[in-house]
Amino acid sequence: MALVELLMPKMGESIMEATVLTWLKSEGDTIEQDESVLEVATDKVDTEVPSTHAGVLKEILAKDGEVVEVGKPIAVIATDGEDNATSSTPKQEAKAEPAKVEAVTVEATPSSNGSFAIESDRFYSPLVKNIAKKEGIPMAELETVPGTGKEGRVTKNDILNYLDSRGSQEASTPTSAPTQSTSQAVTVSKSAPLVPASIDAGDEIIEMDRMRKMIAERMVDSKRISPHVTSFVEADVTNIVFWRNRNKNEFKQREGGNLTFTPIFIEAVAKAIKDYPMINIQVDGDKIIKKKDINIGMAVALPSGNLIVPVIKNADQLNLTGLANKVNDLAIRARDNKLSPDELSGGTFTISNVGSFGNVMGTPIIMQPQVGILALGAIVKKPAVIETPQGDAIAIRHKMFLSHSYDHRVVDGSLGGMVVRRVADHLERFEMNREI
């Protein structure tokens, strides 16, 4: 008999940890290869983790509710193989005591660049370290952040909550590097509480579900990270409305799905991104990453009222029929909670159809680490001045507003405005005689 570690799998781009929701198998249960053994949750999706080997679930290492890094062991499986062909049961490592909130003393020594290198036994996940680095939190200050994870471990929520209250905290940190090893005391006062909501008799208190908490956290993060600017354009989509009305029945009979406006909008966005590729970028510190693929996310409203954003990979390489079928497939499976983590990751630009709720326009919040998102307003009949061979005339036209929010750190108003204008141009030039 051999013992094999079951590791937390990688479940999408930028996902570095996952939370164990529930174990589908108990210790001692027999499991087959590829059989689901537990459910986990990331900040993108809930999913089941299959077993990599057949055998007996000998030991569960990660309990319900525990946050585990990608690549870390979560269970031990006893198989029929030889011992020397597999890994052994992971050894338990000593954990550091939780840091105290009031004050903590750490040893600081000057590093080669003059900054403090803190020697600490406290465990920090790569995600927490990355956030601390981006926010300019030195290790001495990070040591004071109270952790709610196992053994006082600082979770992503802990450091984000600390950042929200950081402005009201008084911290004394070293102002200059000492010439020799010394002891520095760092004291942080308790954070000021948020202004409480008023609760009156008859009010109903509703607990946020896990997805709503994640959405709230991501929206706050995005507004904190990116200075949002929004440009608006009104587009005449009369040709598209008439073309769709003429072809939707034939499409449904042939493809078995509805022909909506969404794939037409995605096609126009993909064309505009090819025209202006510097909107298809991401920011990494002081570097700009220009993405090769055009992967467009589309916001989908769930029955619960929450939103989820599946991604159409390489949208510029699909024709209109392919886009329509992909949109229908992702939307249906999103509402049935059957999307895979990979289908929710890797987006480079996002659209949100606020017009489906009857809204004429909106100011959407960027999906990090993207730098742009386009809101599509409701299509409304309006009187408009049009040019004819006989001169200007007033006619009834189908119009809609496009709202483009972009990250003003790297996208100036000229580029942000030209992108949304180009999307409108592609929509207004839609060919009426086009076949699908």
Image (cartoon, rainbow, N blue to C red):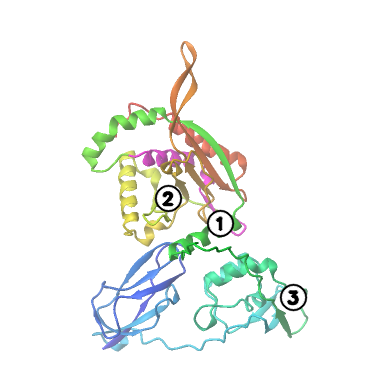
Q: Secondary structure at mark 2?
A: loop
| Residue 299 numbered mark, or none | 2
Q: Most prominent secondary structure in the magenta stretch?
A: helix
Please name whichever residue, 72 or 88, is drawn nearer the observer in this view of the structure. Answer: 72
Magenta region includes residue 286: yes
Q: Look at 54% across and 81% down and name the residue there.
A: 152
Could you tell whether 433 is left or right of 195 in the image? left
Within 10 Å of the Cα at label 3, are there few (<14), some (14-19), or many (20+) other Cα atoms?
Answer: few
Q: Which residues are magenta?
A: 260-287
The amino acid on which the numbered mark 1 sits, given as a three-letter code, is Ser
C-alpha separation, residue under disc 2 versus residue under disc 1? 16 Å
Q: Earlier in the sequence, mark 2 or mark 3?
A: 3
| Residue 172 numbered mark, or none | 3
Q: Look at 45% across and 53% down and name the residue there.
A: 347
C-alpha separation, residue under disc 3 versus residue under disc 1? 29 Å
Q: Position of residue 240 (x, y in %)?
A: 38, 31
Q: Look at 48% across and 23% down and name the residue there.
A: 383
The amino acid on which the numbered mark 2 sits, given as a three-letter code, is Ala
Q: Is residue 254 above or below residue 111?
A: above
Q: Which quadrant would the N terminus be assigned to in this image? A: bottom left
Q: Quarter of the image holding residue 432?
A: top left
Which residue carries the number 1 mark? 222
Q: Position of residue 259 (x, y in %)?
A: 31, 39
Q: Secondary structure at mark 1?
A: helix
The reply to whether dot 2 and dot 3 touch (C-beta < 8 Å) is no
Q: Earlier in the sequence, mark 3 or mark 1?
A: 3
Within 10 Å of the Cα at label 2, are there few (<14), some (14-19), or many (20+) other Cα atoms?
Answer: some
Q: Position of residue 333 (x, y in %)?
A: 31, 55
Q: Earlier in the sequence, mark 2 or mark 1?
A: 1
Seen as rendered, the residue at the extreme front is 201
Q: Which quadrant would the C terminus be assigned to in this image? A: top left
The total number of labels drawn is 3
